[in-house]
């Protein structure tokens, strides 16, 4: 039956060179606890242009690509998200999940209480490799400032019963920057 791994087992697996569970760079000791690992914001963003297209459909990849402007922030330069503004980003960390672990990305409560939702398509499959994309939206009433390197979300781990041969990579496998929608 699926469950959440213990803090001790998460920390042990992260430093075990023979384990296929890896997060690079390695999280700080306190960032892995209670079945989850804090993840930080990367420095590349795709910012949705307001009213740049009249509508968009998931099947129309070209329209999706025209919707965004890429912004790369040096160091910890701030990004100000206005109310109802949407952006794509990735985590700073590169994840390698083995067949026996999957997870969900959740916004951290500090940011959620400001109105920031840091992940909408939250499932991370067993066998995933890459920097997960974060769909960030400011659902609040005032602008919210975020900076690369801030731990705005967490990966909540769940044990999975998959076999390595049964894994099917997603179309977003091995990504290290945000991308608009790809073919369905």
Image (cartoon, helix red, strand yellow):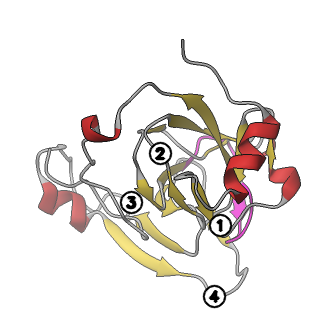
Disc 3: which residue: 50
Q: Quadrant of the C terminus?
A: top left
Task: Please name the residue shown 68% across and 56% down the image.
Answer: 16
Disc 2: which residue: 98
Question: Magenta segment, which residues?
Answer: 137-151
Q: Are marks 1 and 4 in contact (CB under 8 Å)?
A: no
Residue 80 shows which numbered tag? 1
Identify the mark nearer the N-term, 3 or 1.
Answer: 3
Q: Is residue 118 left or right of residue 114?
A: left
Q: Is residue 163 left or right of residue 116?
A: left
Task: Please name the residue shown 70% across and 81% down the image.
Answer: 77
Identify the mark nearer the N-term, 3 or 4.
Answer: 3
Q: Closer to the camera: disc 2 or disc 3?
A: 2
Identify the mark nearer the N-term, 2 or 3.
Answer: 3
CA gap between label 4 and label 2 equals 32 Å
Q: Secondary structure at mark 4?
A: loop
Residue 50 against residue 77 in the figure, above or below: above
Q: Secondary structure at mark 3?
A: loop
| Magenta-colored stretch includes residue 68 | no
Where's residue 56, x and y in %? 20, 47
Magenta segment main secondary structure: loop
Mark 4 closeness class: few <14, some 14–19, many ≥20 residues within 10 Å: few
CA gap between label 3 and label 1 equals 15 Å
Q: Give the residue at the far front of this rendering.
A: 18
Q: Closer to the camera: disc 3 or disc 1?
A: 1
Identify the mark nearer the N-term, 4 or 2.
Answer: 4
Residue 13 against residue 151 in the figure, above or below: above
Q: Closer to the camera: disc 3 or disc 4?
A: 4
Where's residue 151, x and y in %? 74, 57
Residue 74 shows which numbered tag? 4
């Amino acid at each position: 039956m699926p469950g959440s791994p213990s803090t001790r087992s998460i920390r042990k697996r992260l430093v075990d060179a023979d384990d296929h569970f890896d997060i690079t760079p390695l999280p700080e000791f306190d960032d892995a606890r209670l079945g989850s690992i804090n993840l930080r914001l990367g420095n590349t963003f795709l910012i949705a242009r307001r009213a740049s297209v009249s509508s968009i459909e998931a099947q129309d990849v070209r329209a999706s690509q025209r919707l965004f402007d890429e912004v790369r922030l040096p160091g910890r330069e701030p990004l100000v998200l206005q109310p109802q503004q949407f952006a794509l980003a990735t985590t700073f960390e590169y994840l390698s999940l083995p067949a026996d672990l999957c997870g969900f990305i959740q916004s951290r409560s500090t940011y959620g209480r400001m109105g920031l939702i840091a992940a909408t398509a939250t499932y991370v499959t067993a066998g995933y490799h890459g920097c997960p994309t974060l769909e960030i939206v400011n659902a609040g009433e005032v602008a919210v400032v975020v900076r690369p390197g801030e731990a705005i979300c967490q990966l909540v781990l769940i044990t999975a019963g998959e076999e390595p041969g049964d894994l099917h990579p997603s179309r977003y496998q091995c990504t290290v920057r945000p991308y608009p929608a790809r073919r369905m």
